[in-house]
Image: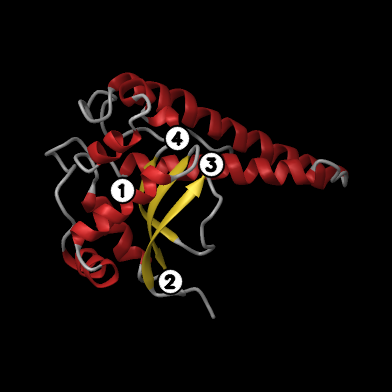
Amino acid sequence: MPHELPKLAYDYAALEPHIDATTMTIHHGKHHQAYVDGLNKAEEGLMKARESGDFAAVQQLSRLVAFHGGGHANHTIFWNNLAPAGKGGGGEPSGDLAEAINRDFGGFDKFKKHFSAAATAVEGNGWGVLAWHPLLGKLYIETMMNQQNLTVIGSIPLLMLDVWEHAYYLKYQNKRADYVNAFWNVANWKDAERRFAEAVNVKIPK
Ligand code: MN3
């Protein structure tokens, strides 16, 4: 079954003014669609390689699966990590996730500053990620260059922020820090809490 572009739970304009409708339209409809198409094409290439036994292009195809598979997975999570401000977006986490953030980062304000700094400092295109690592048993703030580099294998993303220029440039131009700051108004903590509740049940064998 080929991969498909997921539908958004809100309208393209619903995250205004923090994330503008034009950016959302292009980001979801064009960029994410291109990752879906790229992943399908790379998987088809690998299927043909297995059938023919010709693995001459395996290095390139493996890279394309990592890049486009990362792009598809990251955006699928990212859209659900967002909600309109005041209607699920903004505020602070509660419950077990809030407790874990306090334990592992020394409080929500310290977490927020650390995450903002890490996401703003990503070199070139990439992501800021709050992740749970089942084997290491802690929350981590990770960064990714492009769609997949620099992360610890086995990490489960809870809250992701796309800091590729395509995610903010139309509205914020070179002011990535302003975009990262605006993100907190549309961050969907209920979604992150739901992910955390499932993630803590995942076991990676030692
Ligand atoms: Mn993107």
Name which of mark 3 and mark 2 comes first in the sequence: 2
Q: Which residue is mark 4?
A: 164
Name which of mark 3 and mark 1 comes first in the sequence: 1
Residue 58 placement: quadrant = top right
Dot label at residue 134: 2
Depth check: give the residue in front, 19 or 42: 19
User: Where is the C terminus found, in terms of image quarters?
Assistant: bottom right
Q: Residues within 10 Å of mark 1 (few under 14, many from 20)?
A: many
Q: Residues within 10 Å of mark 3 (few under 14, many from 20)?
A: some
Q: Amino acid at mark 1?
A: Ser
Name which of mark 4 and mark 1 comes first in the sequence: 1
- For the residues marked 3 and 2, what is the alpha-carbon distance in whole angstroms? 24 Å
User: Where is the N terminus found, in terms of image quarters?
Assistant: top right
Whether tag 4 and tag 1 are in contact, CB under 8 A, the answer is: no
Secondary structure type for disc 2: loop
Q: Which residue is mark 1?
A: 116
Residue 181 placement: quadrant = top left
Tell me: is circle 4 under 8 Å from ligand 1: yes
Name which of mark 3 and mark 4 comes first in the sequence: 3
Q: Amino acid at mark 3?
A: Asn
Whether tag 3 and tag 4 are in contact, CB under 8 A, the answer is: no
- For the residues marked 3 and 4, what is the alpha-carbon distance in whole angstroms? 8 Å
- For the residues marked 4 and 1, what is the alpha-carbon distance in whole angstroms? 14 Å
Depth check: give the residue in front, 104 or 24: 104
- For the residues marked 1 and 2, what is the alpha-carbon distance in whole angstroms? 24 Å
| Residue drawn at 47 percent across, 23 percent down | 30
Dot label at residue 146: 3
